[in-house]
Image (cartoon, grey):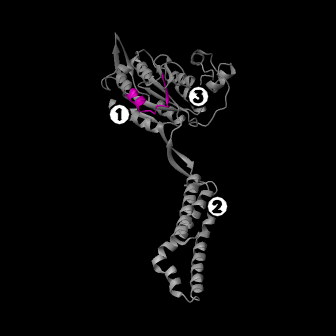
């Protein structure tokens, strides 16, 4: 636990002094009581039979003061809170390699089943959009609350050639920020930009993307992108440059790799191709955007990955100030202390 104003914790040193003062008052009251003639009545009032009751209200009051002092120090603790995610974009690979059967019944069907189960587990207030990508990337279902529309869009996937992972990230960002002027076509087919100049700055200079101030990676809490692919980029926007665009906007890109790292040869309608999973790039995308990479080598693992993502995106751990909780606890303890004292002794403490 951390404290924003730790100097207030020095006030806790008053607690032992308050205990000593309380003990001194008890002794003083006892000596005063001995001067009265009706000594038996006084002793009964202060006797051992009421000893526990007599000390409980002051003890609760002391605990209340301690809680209020700690609250004044503004403690910070890591606690689980409902996520603020309102929109999630599923960017799913529909390249020809997704017909491989190393994930049963094949990669595409396994991905479709897992994605539909993931959507069903999300809270109803979370909007979901779907981007399908192969040689190009396109929004096949704009962000919506309708789970039925999402399932229909997933079931309509058609396999195509090539893999444009970077373009999928850019199209997902365009869906999240429709007023930003993000154009994947300009990024893919635009003129050569100066060496070392970022994609955003180049397009802003040409007026094809609105200028904006970059934010800290992972700081945008209202949306996230989940990118699932089984291959490596063969066309479209550079993957890491697209990841930088997401990072500059604070959007996390969670990457899911499905298939084999070593690769295999896929044949279809007289042509064949060698496909392999580019884990290093997917890990780099997740790291750059302050997200995570997951490997799903089987249909069961893929379902578990989506279950993990569902829990991460609906409940998140954050360092949060808990001063209000401690202040509430202190106030309740003080009220209970005063209430017991009034009920038992007809006075407050």
Rendered position, 39 above or below 225? below
Rendered position, 316 above or below 118? below
Rendered position, 271 above or below 324? above
* Mark closer to the observer (2, 1): 2
User: Tag on residue 208?
Assistant: none
Would you say residue 346 sits in the magenta stretch?
Answer: no
Magenta region, residue range: 114-130
Q: Position of residue 287 (x, y in %)?
A: 51, 36
Where does label 3 land, which residue?
Answer: 245
* Viewer-closest of 159 and 80: 80
Where does label 2 land, which residue?
Answer: 8
Residue located 59% across and 53% down the image: 323
Q: Position of residue 8 (x, y in %)?
A: 64, 61
Please tell me which of labels 1 and 3 falls first in the chain: 3
* Mark closer to the observer (3, 2): 2
* Viewer-closest of 139 and 44: 44
Q: Could you give the CA–CA distance between mark 1 and mark 3, rounded to whole angstroms? A: 30 Å
Please tell me which of labels 2 and 1 falls first in the chain: 2
Q: Position of residue 37 (x, y in %)?
A: 56, 89
Where does label 1 land, which residue?
Answer: 301
Q: Could you give the CA–CA distance between mark 3 and mark 2, rounded to whole angstroms? A: 43 Å
Neighbour class for label 1 at 10 Å: few (<14), some, many (≥20)? some
């Amino acid at each position: 636990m951390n404290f924003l104003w730790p100097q207030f914790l020095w006030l806790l040193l008053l607690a032992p002094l308050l205990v000593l003062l309380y003990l001194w008052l008890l002794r003083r009251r006892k000596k005063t009581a001995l001067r009265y003639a009706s000594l038996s009545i006084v002793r009964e009032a202060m006797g051992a039979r009421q000893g526990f009751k007599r000390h409980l209200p002051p003890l609760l009051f002391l605990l209340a003061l301690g809680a209020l002092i700690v609250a004044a120090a503004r403690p910070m603790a890591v606690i689980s809170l409902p996520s603020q995610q309102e929109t999630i974009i599923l960017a799913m690979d529909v390249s020809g390699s997704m017909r491989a059967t190393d994930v049963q019944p094949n990669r595409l069907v396994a991905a479709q089943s897992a994605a539909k189960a993931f959507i069903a587990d999300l809270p109803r207030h979370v909007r979901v959009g779907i981007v399908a990508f192969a040689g190009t990337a396109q929004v096949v279902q704009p962000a919506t609350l309708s789970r039925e529309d999402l399932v229909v869009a997933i079931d309509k996937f058609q396999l195509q050639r090539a893999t444009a992972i970077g373009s999928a990230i850019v199209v997902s960002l365009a869906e999240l920020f429709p007023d930003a002027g993000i154009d994947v076509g300009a990024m893919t087919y635009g003129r050569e930009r100066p060496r070392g100049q970022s994609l955003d700055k180049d397009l802003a200079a040409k007026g094809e993307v609105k200028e904006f101030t970059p934010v800290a990676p992972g700081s945008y809490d209202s949306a996230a992108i989940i990118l699932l692919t089984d291959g490596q980029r063969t066309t479209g926007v550079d993957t890491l440059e697209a990841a930088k665009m997401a990072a500059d906007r604070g959007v996390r890109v969670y990457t899911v790799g499905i298939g084999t790292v070593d690769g295999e040869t896929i044949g279809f309608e007289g042509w064949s191709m060698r496909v392999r999973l580019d884990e290093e790039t997917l890990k780099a995308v997740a790291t750059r955007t302050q997200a995570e990479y997951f490997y799903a080598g089987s249909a069961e693992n893929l379902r578990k990955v989506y279950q993990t993502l569902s829990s991460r995106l609906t409940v998140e751990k954050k360092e949060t100030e808990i001063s209000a909780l401690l202040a509430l606890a202190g106030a309740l303890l003080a009220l209970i202390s005063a209430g017991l004292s009034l009920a038992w002794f007809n006075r407050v403490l």
